[in-house]
Image (spheres, helix red, strand yellow):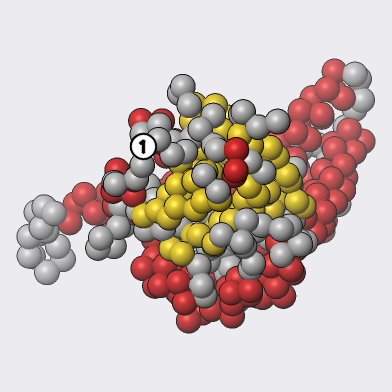
């Protein structure tokens, strides 16, 4: 078999071509579904709008359907922040519109059973969907852009010494500094953290999307975080889309301790705590030399009698923590789903979406829903948080 010039087609190019066609077909199918369901619900499901209204709807949704993949490629593959802002916003908006269009069709079916006829029934559904979607997008954008709420929780550790009872660990994660300039937001988050009397401050990965050069000014406020015993940081999966080692080095320059499969030990009186951190679970497959989650390396030489507090970006890394008898793992990654009902899809991949859970005989896991957001500047039924974990000794008081 040959190409148009008569030269044989290399066998190795066929799987690549098949993959490209498969991915392209999948993307096209998703785009058609995301935009097709709202188009049907708002303009054709028995609404019988005037032709001009239906035509305007078709044109508007078609343009949005073309803009989404175009802006996402220009923004995230080629680094154009303006295009990324457009693509991310359209993606979030159409996801909310799709979900509530599906629910609107269920409402329409119920109204039909109740004997309400078209076009009133379908117009009522269409108007309800628009009102709900616009309201959720406005509210969701506010939720995404505001300084997160503070969530404080006591966590009891069997092996924690009495002298460390009440240790305050302040956690942030998934800040995702990116195409939307959030330097001012970052400064307000740091101001809020500094009101929380932190003994230890943690950033559990997905610090930024983009290079150090592009996001440096948004990250700069983290230099001013105050914590009595130290500030620690580990990589998330998004660091491995670009400059993971550069971000580790940069956080060190800001005065944070980068736990690249490493640990520190803190103590008070006769009590001590091992604080360990590992790379994200995707690090080994990223092609970044010297990176890959390695809890054994992080704990090598640590006193086995001391309690271990572990930073690991993804909740599913808890299996390794259980194997090593870690007392408490803290993770992020899930965003709490970020835009409902995405949390149910996240749950298919991760053991938890948010909150405190028990694993194995000793290990506890706290999963933060994240402090910032990725991509679409919306949080719908998935509020962000700054977490304060107050570590308690079982024998205290």
**Neighbourhood count class around disc 1 (C-alpha, 10 Å): few under 14, some 14–19, many 20 upward:** few
Number of numbered tags placed on the structure image: 1
Q: Quadrant of the C terminus?
A: top right
Q: Nearer the viewer, residue 253 or 88?
A: 253
Q: Quadrant of the N terminus?
A: bottom left
**Would you identify the image quadrant in which residue 317 lies?**
top left
Q: Nearer the viewer, residue 146 or 47?
A: 146
Q: Nearer the viewer, residue 49 or 169?
A: 169
Give the x, y percent position of residue 215: 54, 76
Q: Secondary structure at mark 1?
A: loop
Residue at 68% across, 37% down: 154
Q: Is residue 358 left or right of residue 240?
A: right
Vertical comparison of 213 with 85: above or below: below
Residue at 80% across, 59% down: 142
Residue at 48% across, 70% down: 251
Give the x, y percent position of residue 138: 82, 57
Vertical comparison of 222 with 88: above or below: below
Q: Residue furthest front?
A: 269
Vertical comparison of 197 with 126: above or below: below
* Residue 129 in view (yes/no): yes
Residue at 75% across, 33% down: 103
Q: Is residue 278 left or right of residue 46?
A: left
Q: Which residue is mark 1?
A: 304
Give the x, y percent position of residue 370: 62, 51
Give the x, y percent position of residue 124: 90, 38
Q: Is residue 241 left or right of residue 160?
A: left
* Residue 33 in view (yes/no): no
Vertical comparison of 163 with 105: above or below: below
């Amino acid at each position: 078999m040959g190409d148009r010039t008569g030269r044989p087609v290399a066998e190795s190019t066929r799987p690549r071509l098949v993959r490209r066609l498969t991915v392209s077909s999948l993307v096209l199918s998703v785009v058609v579904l995301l935009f097709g369901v709202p188009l049907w619900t708002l303009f054709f499901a028995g609404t019988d709008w005037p032709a001009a209204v239906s035509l305007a709807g078709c044109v508007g949704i078609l343009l949005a359907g073309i803009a989404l993949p175009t802006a996402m490629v220009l923004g995230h593959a080629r680094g154009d922040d303006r295009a990324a802002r457009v693509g991310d916003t359209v993606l979030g908006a159409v996801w909310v519109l799709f979900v509530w269009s599906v629910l609107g069709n269920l409402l329409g079916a119920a109204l039909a059973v109740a004997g309400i006829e078209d076009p009133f029934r379908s117009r009522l559904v269409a108007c309800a969907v628009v009102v709900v979607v616009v309201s959720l997008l406005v509210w969701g954008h506010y939720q995404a852009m505001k300084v997160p709420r503070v969530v404080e929780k006591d966590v009891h550790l069997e092996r924690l010494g009495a002298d460390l009872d009440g240790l305050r660990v302040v956690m942030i994660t998934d800040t995702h500094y990116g195409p939307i300039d959030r330097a001012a937001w970052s400064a307000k988050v740091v101001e809020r953290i500094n009101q929380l009397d932190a003994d230890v401050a943690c950033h559990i990965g997905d610090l930024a999307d983009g290079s150090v050069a592009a996001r440096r000014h948004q990250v700069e406020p983290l230099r001013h975080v105050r914590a009595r015993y130290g500030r620690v940081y580990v990589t998330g999966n998004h660091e491995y889309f670009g400059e993971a080692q550069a971000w580790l080095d940069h956080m060190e320059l800001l005065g944070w301790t980068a736990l690249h499969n490493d640990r520190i030990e803190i103590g008070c009186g006769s009590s001590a705590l091992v604080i360990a951190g590992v790379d994200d679970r995707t690090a080994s497959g990223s092609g970044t030399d010297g990176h890959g989650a390695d809890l054994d390396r992080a704990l090598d030489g640590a006193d086995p009698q001391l309690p271990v507090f572990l930073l690991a970006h993804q909740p599913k890394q808890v299996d390794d923590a259980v194997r090593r008898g870690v007392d408490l793992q803290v993770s992020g990654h899930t965003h709490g789903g970020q835009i409902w009902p995405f949390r149910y899809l996240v749950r298919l991949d991760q053991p938890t979406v948010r909150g405190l859970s028990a694993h194995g005989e000793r290990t506890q896991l706290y999963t933060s829903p994240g402090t910032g957001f990725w991509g679409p500047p919306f949080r719908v039924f998935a509020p962000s948080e700054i977490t304060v974990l107050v570590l308690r000794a079982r024998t205290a008081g």
